[in-house]
Image (spheres, helix red, strand yellow):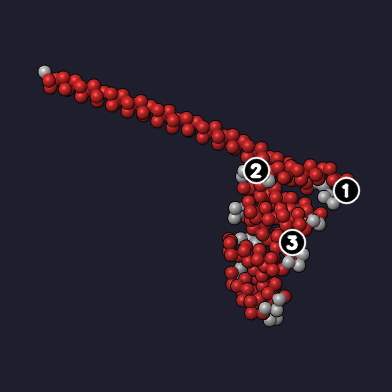
Amino acid sequence: MQDMNEKASLDQKLAGVIKKQRRTIIIAVAVIVALIIFGIVYNKVSTNKYEKTMNKLFAVETKLQGIDVKAEENTKELDSIINDLDAISSASKVYPKAKANLSLANIYYQKGDYNKTIEYLDKAVEVSNRTYLTQIALINRAVVYEDNNQVDKALEDYQKIWDDFGKESAYSPKALFAIARIYDEKNNIELAKSTYEQLVDQFPNSEYSRLAENRLSLL
């Protein structure tokens, strides 16, 4: 009789444990389902937001192509474009915010505003997360630095393109040639020759390689 009572007690305890486990499993499944639904909804909202941002960016840049940024009669329209690009530059995704900053840099470069050009190129480099847009920002910033006689800063950006992206960058031949040319202009012949030779060795089919070969023949 005692054994039967103990068995009944054990059965009740086991039933209680199973019931608790079932409830825990049900709760866990409900949580997982809720997270999946949330993820689907969030991704859909995020995707829609990204598409809207990209559509806005495309529309603004299309409008920008059709105006002369230096013309006084376009000031109001240009201000509107700048405001739109500034808003896009705070987007969460890398591409639209980097592209918006590059477009703003281009506007101010055409307007002859060196400080603003560098400001937006700095931002483009910062937010582009070592992508193709980073390379574009670096090569353009280097050119602007050279235009304003900041040769050492230009040299740093040209070198950064090669150091960070190597042969994977379409801008590396141009960057290496610029590095060699700057050393050449500084009369640092040994560094100039070694960089020209590096360019010829790494990119034998590049137009910059042919320019390097011509220059090497004179050094």
Residue 156's image quarter?
bottom right
Q: Residue furthest front?
A: 2
Image position, residue 39 (x, y; %): 51, 35
Q: Dot 1 lies on which element? A: helix
Check disc 2 and give the amino acid type.
Answer: Ala
Q: Of residues 19 and 211, which is closer to you in this image?
A: 19
Q: Quadrant of the N terminus?
A: top left
- Measured Cα–Cα span from mark 3 to mark 2: 26 Å
Q: Are marks 3 and 2 in contact (CB under 8 Å)?
A: no
Check disc 1 and give the amino acid type.
Answer: Glu
- Measured Cα–Cα span from mark 1 to mark 2: 30 Å
The residue carrying mark 2 is 91
Q: Are marks 1 and 2 in contact (CB under 8 Å)?
A: no
Check disc 3 and give the amino acid type.
Answer: Val
Image position, residue 59 (x, y; %): 73, 41
N-terminal of the two: label 3 or label 1?
Answer: 1
- Measured Cα–Cα span from mark 3 to mark 1: 24 Å
The residue carrying mark 3 is 144
Q: Left of 177 or right of it: where is 62?
A: right
The residue carrying mark 1 is 72
Residue 58 appears in the figure:
no
Residue 141's image quarter?
bottom right
Q: Dot 3 lies on which element? A: helix
Tell me which residue sits at (63%, 61%) in the image: 170
Residue 9 appears in the figure:
yes
Q: Are marks 3 and 1 in contact (CB under 8 Å)?
A: no
Q: Dot 2 lies on which element? A: loop
Tell me which residue sits at (78%, 53%) in the image: 108
**Is the residue 4 above or below the residue 37 in the image?**
above
